[in-house]
Amino acid sequence: MTPRFLLLTDVQEILNISSPQAYALVRSGDLPAIQVGGRGQWRVEATELESYIQRQYEAARSRIPTEK
């Protein structure tokens, strides 16, 4: 069963980015996340990560000129 929430380390691995980059995505609001537990550990819902990836694909497509 796939977990509903991912650790930021999971996000880093999936996106192949550094820890500061993952935190920057969360702090900027580009990647919605919640804080849980006494230490305020960040968690990203798997569906939110997929939505973020789709938005990045759409943004990349909009930067590529289409040929007609």
Image: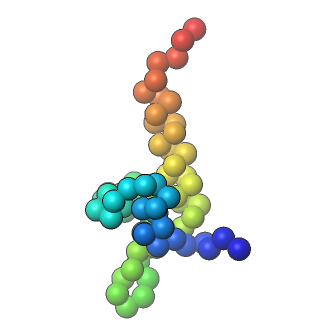
9 shown above or below 63: below
Residue at point 46%, 54% (across, down): 15
Q: Position of residue 44 (x, y in %)?
A: 48, 68
Which quarter of the figure is the C terminus placed in?
top right
Residue at point 42%, 62% (across, down): 12
Identify the residue at the far top of this view: 68
Choose between 11 and 61: the one closer to the eye.
11
Q: Position of residue 7 (x, y in %)?
A: 46, 73
Is there any visible trace of residue 21 in the rendered image?
yes
Residue at point 47%, 28% (across, down): 62
53 shown above or below 33: above
Q: Is 37 situated left or right of 57 in this image? A: left
Q: How did the renderer colour the structure?
A: rainbow
- Residue 3 picture quarter: bottom right
Which quarter of the figure is the N terminus placed in?
bottom right
Q: Position of residue 58 (x, y in %)?
A: 51, 37
Is there any visible trace of residue 23 in the rendered image?
no
Residue at point 50%, 30% (across, down): 61
Identify the residue at the far right of this view: 1
Q: Is 12 situated left or right of 61 in this image? A: left
Number of residue marks:
0
